[in-house]
Amino acid sequence: MKKVIVMTTAILTLSTVIAGCSPSATKENTAKNASESTKDKASSSKLDPYKLTIVYATGAVPKDLKAVQEKMNAYLTDKINATVELKPIEWGTWIEKTNLMIATNEQMDVMMTAGGLGYSQNVAKGAFLPLDELVAKYGADVTKALQPQFLDGTRIGGKIYGLPTNKEFASVDGILFNKALVDKYKFDISKVNKLEDLEPMLQTIKDNEPGIVPFFGQEGRQMSNFAVSSSSFDNLGDYLGGLDRSSKELKVVDIFESKVFMDYAKLARKWYQAKYMNLDAATVKDFGAMQAGKAFAMYSELKPGKDAEMSSAWGVKVVQKEMVNTPITLNTTGIMTAIPRTSKDPNRAMMFLNMLYGDKTLLNLFDFGVEGTHYVKKDEATIDFPAGVDAASVGYKNEPWMWGNQMLTYLFPNEDPKKWEKFKTFNETADKSPALGFAWNSETLTQEVAASNSVLKQYQQAIMSGSVDPEVYVPKMVAALKSAGIDKIIAEKQKQLNEWSATAKK
């Protein structure tokens, strides 16, 4: 899902400039007491009580959310004299709801964000606090977990506004397959090296499996995502101008004018007309048919053990096939947490975030729920669902790839015990983007960015799902983007990238 997060490009930006909140007495008291009590950890007895509001995206709000929140509160009260109010928002309404929350200055202490979910735009609007001083004071576990290049990759204007999750920072484009159908038809997925290799398999499913979608697409995650993925382009955070991965130049180009985009859009149209894809691929917002075992294959950005991870999450066994041999490093802003400017106690918010990078008990409680109720431990590293419970019926689950130091989280029995070691190798051996560590500042072009994202919202999903003729609609989208100001955005990105490159080489 990660990638949801991942591949969401139809971003609505804010129309209202966020008004900053002045430092409160609570902030000052917390900073004073925390600094007096300890160098690394706050002494809860010397901190005033505080409730942290945590805002993040979810597939569906779990029914046992309150029970997990109560357990977290008991633990956090002892550690940093804080409680939490968990505010999960379903992915389908995330953009609209969080934009409204920010625009109306609703109090939030921790908020999920990402390069593809308006990170740079929200920084430009003043929605997020700079974190450098907070990390220096209360982020010892953050800096221990994250390599400097990954933390630096979130900087805008020289400042850190988001903390990246310590997970894989690379990906390989590929396909997730329903294992039962692969086995039933004895498909050799090892021979799938380009999308056209899938077509005989998709035809077989279409001909023999009524009720099964041969290739499942959802909003932001479709077959033609290969056109805008890391194997084709470094999207530089928001897809409004990127680097062509086939070139060694640091030259920002319009992704949507490229031959690569048009070619994949044409293939998507072919599959749509052949009825290989679900007709609602442009609008469906969840894993739907794939998660229900009613689809054969879908696009995914892959990593070591992604198939095992999704099998546990969905309760349907899937297997993966990489379509690009070399993993590509993504922008490190793929998924992050920020402290909104409306927080009344940023110090405590950072203490909480720091615990997610170093406190295994809290992290796994937040990710998997209450031991004995939502999971049982098999050993110190492995958990499973309790008897009579599965991925579909469990009362609580979160997304471990979204939070803190994922390499401290438990594994399920079907996952590789060496998964975290492989993640580290995966990151270290990946083909690095020449712009790794660059994050662009859209502050001077907020109107152009907002207008361009509105154009993408209007056209992109329909084109990428194959729902419309790309030879008609891609030129329309390109023209609309130019009217919205994408050429100005590309020029400014190029300017900032050149300046960053000159500094980075010193």
Image (cartoon, helix red, strand yellow):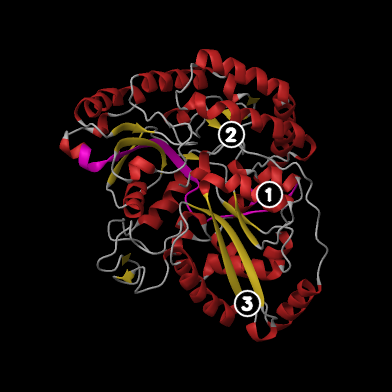
User: In whole angstroms, how far apart are the C-alphas of marks 3 and 2?
Assistant: 38 Å
Residue 486, horizontal then vertical, whole percent: 70, 26
Query: Which dot, 1 or 3, sits closer to the camera?
Result: 1
Name the element at disc 1: helix
Report the number of discs.
3
Give the answer, above or below, for where 24 lies relative to 102. Answer: below
Q: Indicate yes or no whether the magenta region holds residue 168.
A: yes
Residue at 56% of width from left, 76% of height from top? 76
Q: Camera-side residue: 262 or 483? A: 483
What is the magenta range?
Answer: 152-181
Residue picked out by circle 3: 41
- The numbered mark, 3 or 2, whose residue comes first in the sequence reads 3
Identify residue type, mark 2.
Asn
Residue 160 shows in the view: no
Residue 5, horizontal then vertical, whole percent: 52, 45
Residue at 56% of width from left, 19% of height from top? 258
- The numbered mark, 1 or 2, whose residue comes first in the sequence reads 1
Identify residue type, mark 1.
Leu
Judged left or right of residue 191, residue 325 is: right
Residue picked out by circle 1: 100
Please rate how many residues cluster around mark 2, counting C-alpha atoms within 10 Å: few if below 14, some from 14 to 19, many from 20: many
Q: Camera-side residue: 14 or 384? A: 14
Identify residue type, mark 3.
Lys
Give the answer, above or below, for where 416 lies relative to 246. Answer: below
Q: Which mark is residue 235?
A: 2
Please rate how many residues cluster around mark 3, counting C-alpha atoms within 10 Å: few if below 14, some from 14 to 19, many from 20: some
Q: Going by the picture, which residue comes out furthest to the right?
A: 22
Q: Which mark is residue 185?
A: none
Residue 161, horizontal then vertical, whole percent: 69, 53
